[in-house]
Amino acid sequence: MNTRPEAAPLLSVRGLAKYYGTRIGCTDVSFDLWPGEVLGIVGESGSGKSTLLSCLAGHQQPDRGEIHFDGRDLLAMSEPERRRLSRTEQAFVHQNPRDGLRMGISAGGNIGERLMAVGARNYGQIRETGLDWLGRVEIAGARIDDRPSAFSGGMQQRLQIARNLVTAPRLVFMDEPTGGLDVSVQARLLDLLRGLVRDLGLSVVLVTHDLAVVRLLAHRLMVMKSGQVVEQGVTDQVLDDPQHGYTQLLVSSVLQV
Amino acid sequence: MNVASADNYNFAYLDEQTKRMLRRAILKALAVPGYQVPFAPREMPMPYGWGTGGVQVSAACLVPEDRLKVIDQGADDTTNAVSIRKFFQRVAGVATTETTTEATVIQTRHRIPETPLKEDQILVYQVPIPEPLRFLEPRETETRRMHALEEYGLMHVKLYEDIARHGEIATAYAWPVMAEGRYVMTPSPIPKFDNPKLSDCPAIQLFGAGREARIHALPPWTKVVSLDFEDHPFQASKADHACEICGSCESYLDEVITDDQGGRMFVCSDTDFCSTRSNAQQSGAA
Ligand SMILES: Nc1ncnc2c1ncn2[C@@H]1O[C@H](COP(=O)(O)OP(=O)(O)OP(=O)(O)O)[C@@H](O)[C@H]1O
Ligand SMILES: [Mg+2]
């Protein structure tokens, strides 16, 4: 499984730290993410998962450390460059679709926004791409002119995914993408995500507190506690044979359920 | 020096310090076509909806030798146009005119005159909302950043929504434009019919928003492009009629209700253009 044909990691993180005043957000985080790889980040509430993700995605400035994306130093990039990158080669899927969608704009407009942002100026083509992506996330094409507010939670989340993937990003950040959804809706979304990740060869950093989600999606797993990485490795290995006491606790508490 | 004609006002109502501040904003706006320059607005003796932004810009531009024309929706004789004209007559003592070719400063609400403008003229627009992105992005910090980084995708999202909903871009007024290939700006609520006149115009065009305290500008001969899609290109359109007074097929028409029986007629919205044409026709016929 873990074949690594590419010579260099897509995302390389070293010694990353973010503080909120004196409180630790996250600290000493280092890892490499390879093309086509899904990295799961798990840990209890307040362990620093969202903080880490927002630093990686450029939503927050870390206090220490380095982030390289495809060999480029993200923290040394100018703001326009960084923002362009986050609209083209990167994407961010929020837990709450309301944070990632424009609720007052049609589904087609939501999907088309990133295309228009990078210069698409042909209405017919933008619409065709919108229809194609609605299909890929299993939303009927007839809904293309409806606003997301008329969609169910699961549909909104799928629309958010379509809106993000339309520019064919290489790296996608996801913060609890299945968080607020019913179990059956979650399962369908997970299947969809798994298919998209495989078909598009996406690299993903996936934050969740749901071990079932990482078991299904993540090739590798990183366990965080109090802002620090306590264990990382191949997902099945970490879950089946946890080394750190905290991971053992985490895994056993899930197995008991 | 600048002595007011009546009362105890400084020339053109505003004090010299304020005019200097406004002129600095205007010069900056002219230096960066389409960029919205903030200014500190002054209390004017009229309500906001009456074009206080335009009035302040005009006041900063006027010199005693000027000849001022004021139009509202193309007409010189509406209450709004008449009272602004009277205001400047009183506080600046400048000559006024209704004839486009004779005016040196023209303050306008919602139209560009039909008669082509000249190099020594200044056209001052009254602007209600200077930010074309406001409708889509309410946060001022974010719209500023979007301008700074030329992130204008959202403008096209608005046009996309129009076409998706109405089959065409339904925007009839304030059609957004790109100034000199850099800043997206609103031309104020002029009909899209007037948009082509914005580009390569010999006159100076100044846009004043009073409530929002912004000035933007187009220096003479600026390239101005109306935003559109390749497969839904911008088209300047007007009612498909001739003016029933002067017979013009080229000018922008207003539909006027003539009685309570549903009677209506199409006439030029530019009253000076219309009367100049009909006078010429009458003297030609005589
Ligand atoms: N904006 C903020 N200001 C101050 N402290 C913050 C802020 N955001 C997070 N923190 C603190 O940083 C630490 C890490 O929080 P973070 O939100 O990254 O955790 P998390 O793992 O995402 O938790 P959850 O699973 O609840 O989403 C916590 O102690 C939290 O209280
Ligand atoms: Mg979180």
Image (tube, coloured by chain):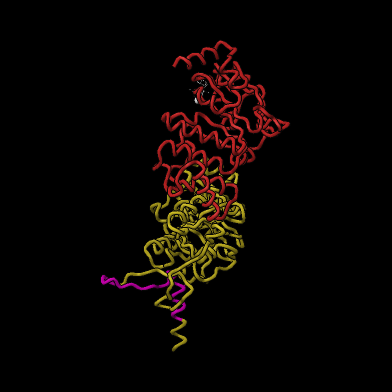
Chain colours: A red, B yellow
In the image shown, does B175 or B70 lie closer to the viewer?
B175
Residue most toward the bottom?
Answer: B286
Query: Who's the residue at 42% across and 45% down the image?
Result: A147
Residue A170 relative to residue A136: left or right: right
Residue A121 relative to residue B280: left or right: right
Query: Who's the residue at 54% across and 51% down the image?
Result: A126
Residue B205: x, y in percent?
55, 60
Residue most toward the left?
Answer: B261
Is B280 located above or below residue A252 in the figure? below
The quarter of the rendered structure image containing the C terminus of chain B is bottom left
Is B102 located above or below residue A72 in the figure? below
Is A217 located above or below residue B193 in the figure? above
How many marks on residues?
Answer: 0
Residue A48: x, y in percent?
54, 21
Residue most toward the front?
Answer: A1
Residue A9 is at least partly visible in this image: yes
In the image shown, does A165 or B173 lie closer to the viewer?
A165
Residue B159: x, y in percent?
49, 54
- Residue B268 falls within the magenta-colored stretch: yes
Displayed quadrant of residue A58: top right
Residue most toward the top?
Answer: A245
Residue B42 is at least partly visible in this image: no
- Residue B57 falls within the magenta-colored stretch: no
The residues colored magenta run B259-279
In the image shown, does A148 or A51 lie closer to the viewer?
A148
The quarter of the rendered structure image containing the N terminus of chain B is bottom right
Query: Who's the residue at 44% across and 17% down the image?
Result: A257
Residue B253: x, y in percent?
42, 70
